[in-house]
Image: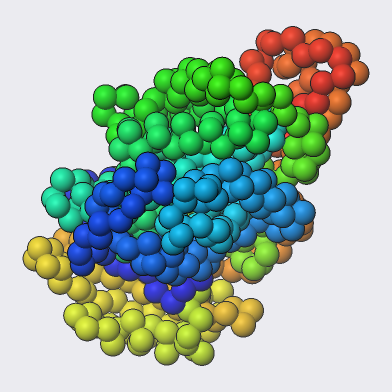
Amino acid sequence: MKKYLNMIPIKKPFIKTIILVVITALVLPNCVSIQTSPVSGNKRAYGYSWEQELQIGKDADSEIIAQYGLYDDDELSNYVSELGQELLEVSHFNREDTPSEYRNTDFTFRVLASPVVNAFALPGGYVYVTRGLLAHLENEAQLMVVLGHEIGHVAARHASQRAAEQQFGQLAIIGGAVLGESIGLDGGNILQLSSQTAQLLFLSYSRDDERESDQLGVEYSAMKGYKASEGGEFFRSLKRISEKSGYNIPSHLSSHPDPGEREENIPRLANEWSEKGYEQTIVDGDEYLNMIDNIMYGDNPREGFERNGIFYHPDLKFQFPVPAGFNVINQPSAVILVNENQDAVVQFSIDNESSTPEESVKAFLNQEGVNTLEQNATQPNGLTGYEAEASLQQEDGTSLTIDITALSYNGNIYNFLGYTTSDQFGAYQSEFNSVPNGFERLVDSSILNIQPVRLELIKTTRSGSFSSFLPSNLPLNIEPIDVAIINQVQLEENIPSGSWIKIPRQ
């Protein structure tokens, strides 16, 4: 957790989309570079030189790791990396006509700890898949198409192409997502990213970019003998997730192809490679499922969760109340509480730089533009603390009033930063104060010992509808349809005896 969160401008509607709020000062390239495309072999304009792309990816990689965390499973991480390296052998980075500057580019493949179904690539050879995505795949062939798709973005230098077009004033960068589909974006996690990393992570590729990466993902997979048509099944899952979550975007409004379109196109592309003589027989379902057996599913409650108006953090052994009507965004760097009207925020984080609560609060008050209204020591629930009220004038003339409290607990300094527009502060002051005043030690053993949900691999011993294999009580807020989507089946679909299925257990 970092010291302080960036102040979020309060405008109406306030934080209507917290995902995009940090992308306010994008880093644009200084000049356009004309270079050869490793995919087409033609000259074209790029926003960055290839050397710059290599450095950009390297710099952003450390930020991605700090924000999302790496999934703690070396065997699974090595497995994903080995598959990615296989695809690179037949990619446009390792062909006879590959320009020398691209040949044998080092790629890094990482599994992130995020539960969101996500995969993305950074310029210069950094490819990420989340544990959430891996939980939704059924075999190695599907993973190969996903990895090939992301390698394709790097090979075609799509991010650099978009950066060049932005410089020409032809493109507005907006929030984007995995494989081009907006599905439950892990928006809170970008609040601490640099503007350049946020720009890259939420870059909106064009429909043609996404289609080209689909083609390359299928091409690379087919050339290694994998049944690339299986990738269509994954996009069917994306469509189901999208429909259930309500995050789906009408295709004419999205800059990316609809997952239903891609569900149909990928098998067609795979067939074209079959007609070229590439035998595609490798699926490796059993091997893949064995690799993800016991994978974590959903949010990890040990890193914090909200239940019945209380936010609990089992690992750090604390709890605090969540005001009625406030929603919780839990991220590695902070916990954000946003009210339903989206005009008030409480931001909770750890201050790793200050040694006392007073020092922590005064460090905030001493920032340029912050006007201190009052400050004093406090002792909520017997803890050493310090609190203050301050105001801040925004560029648009709006005045913010800020309530900041720092507390010392178990060797850490914790900050609570509540703020809204000054004319509304009186209406929210009690809610702001209730959060740090309710901060206390977590002693409930059932919560202290709570464990994350994991997917258990089970082999059926009879045939029957998928729903008949589900336990009567699923953990947390998991619904039967969620489990069906994980397994890429319908609830009433007949499952033959001897089939492997994934069941969530806690």
* Residue furthest right in the image: 461
Q: Is residue 343 visible?
A: no
Q: With respect to residue 379, does 305 lie above or below? A: above
Residue 384 seen in this snapshot: yes
On screen, 299 above or below 412? above
Q: Quadrant of residue 487?
A: top right
Residue at screen point 47% across, 51% down = 98
Name the spot of residue 422 as percent of width and height, x first. Answer: 19, 64
Quadrant in the picture for residue 454: top right
Question: Along the line of sight, which residue is nearer the eye, 194 or 188?
Answer: 194
Horizontal side, residue 135 vs residue 57: left or right: right
Q: Residue at x 12, y 68 (%)?
A: 395
Q: Position of residue 241 (x, y in %)?
A: 51, 28
> Where is 341 relative to 483, above or below?
below
Residue 4 at x, y = what percent?
Answer: 39, 74
Quarter of the picture containing the C terminus is top right
Which residue is located at x 24 percent, y 52 percent? 45
Q: Residue at x 30, y 56 (%)?
A: 35
Q: Is 344 left or right of 313, judged from the image as shown?
A: left
Q: Nearer the viewer, residue 341 or 295?
A: 295
